[in-house]
Amino acid sequence: MLPAQAPFPAARFRRARQSDAIRSLVRENTLTPADFIWPVFVRDGEGMEEPVPSMPGVLRRSVDRVADAARDAYAMGIPAICLFPYTDPSLKTADCAEAWNPDNLSNRATRAIKDAVPGMAVMTDVALDPYNIDGHDGFVENGEIVNDRTVEALVKQALSQADAGADIIGPSDMMDGRIGALRQALEAAGHNNVMLLSYAAKYASAFYGPFRDAVGASGALKGDKKSYQMDPANSDEALRLVARDLNEGADMVMIKPGMPYLDICQRVKARFGAPTFAYQVSGEYAMIQAAAQNGWVDGERVMLESLMGFKRAGCDGVLTYFAPEAARILNA
Ligand SMILES: NCc1[nH]cc(CCC(=O)O)c1CC(=O)O
């Protein structure tokens, strides 16, 4: 209910905007480095850092360099890092066995980070696409992305990640029933404290393009992901998915992409009150960087404004490639 407002000139809204001091007193939302989960790309080798062409400012790092970057990020107040492996094409197979190899890139990076920065939360990605010759998040049988057999594989993948020391497991695959299966398997294996951050409302989005380049999945992907990721036209469905995943044992939920789906963030937070995150995805990052590089927008200000939007929409935090840059500015 809105309180009654005095008429002008008794009420002048500009009084509350007159100075930095007053503006900071009445500010409704805040943005801090503690709001960020930083997604990073991991590659093989040592001492390696290579730029991702479609994401200016983003690097693929070898495991040792990821650990160094994690240490720096944590020192800036970023509490969590999220790993995405750039898997060598020769390791991509139809059975996706590399996904649950205890020594795969993601698991090695998890151990290296937990070693270097024990206080930092490590989040890992559950989905078969980095390991699948078909580029899909699930197994493909006769052109169909099959659900139940995929869930069995996702369970193996998640257990290997938990064994490696992951604190937060992020299923980004959009198969049905995976949250319940993962929770049950984690409990049975004694991983009682491993958290599930469900990509509950993940849309079939064109904004993932630069990411697929970054992890080398663009070439591999046959067809599209519309039979498992959500239709961008839907929003009630997002609420049903969040309800379902919370019931199956998700600790936190995510909406993805971010900026075009702030309405979903707001509805989800208002309805469920659960820890709610948005993923400001690769295409959102690339658009801002491209416009900034052309001098068309002030990159730093647009970055911070876009991130504040997530807080205003009710998100508890945001996965963003801007995390280190934004933290540096916020700490200055
Ligand atoms: N499991 C796939 C996955 N995990 C995270 C992203 C996208 C992240 C981004 O665009 O930044 C994707 C892409 C996809 O679904 O094709």
Image: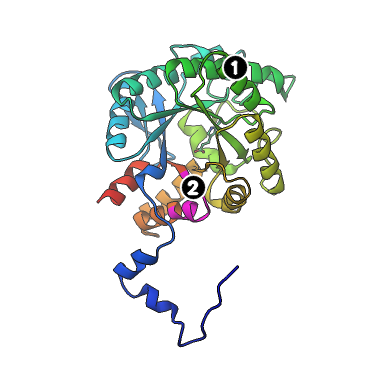
Which portion, as a residue range, is magenta? Answer: 308-317
Q: Eyeballing the image, is 312 above or below 59?
A: below
Horizontal relation, residue 96 to residue 108: left or right: right
Three-letter residue code for mark 1: Ala
* Disc on res. 185: 1
Q: Position of residue 232 (x, y in %)?
A: 66, 46
- Say which element carries label 2: helix
Which of the two marks, 1 or 2, is nearer to us in this view?
Answer: 1
Residue kind at label 2, given as amino acid type: Glu
Q: For the view shown, which residue lies furthest in the left direction?
A: 332
Using the numbered discs, state the Cα–Cα distance from disc 1 to disc 2 in whole angstroms: 35 Å
Q: Residue at x 33, y 28 (%)?
A: 119
The residue under label 2 is 284
> What residue appears at the point 36 percent right and 52 percent down from the top-left corner?
293
The outermost residue toward the bottom is: 9
- x, y percent for residue 159: 53, 16
Q: How is the image coloured?
A: rainbow
* Of residues 241 and 326, the one drawn nearer to the viewer in this rendering: 241
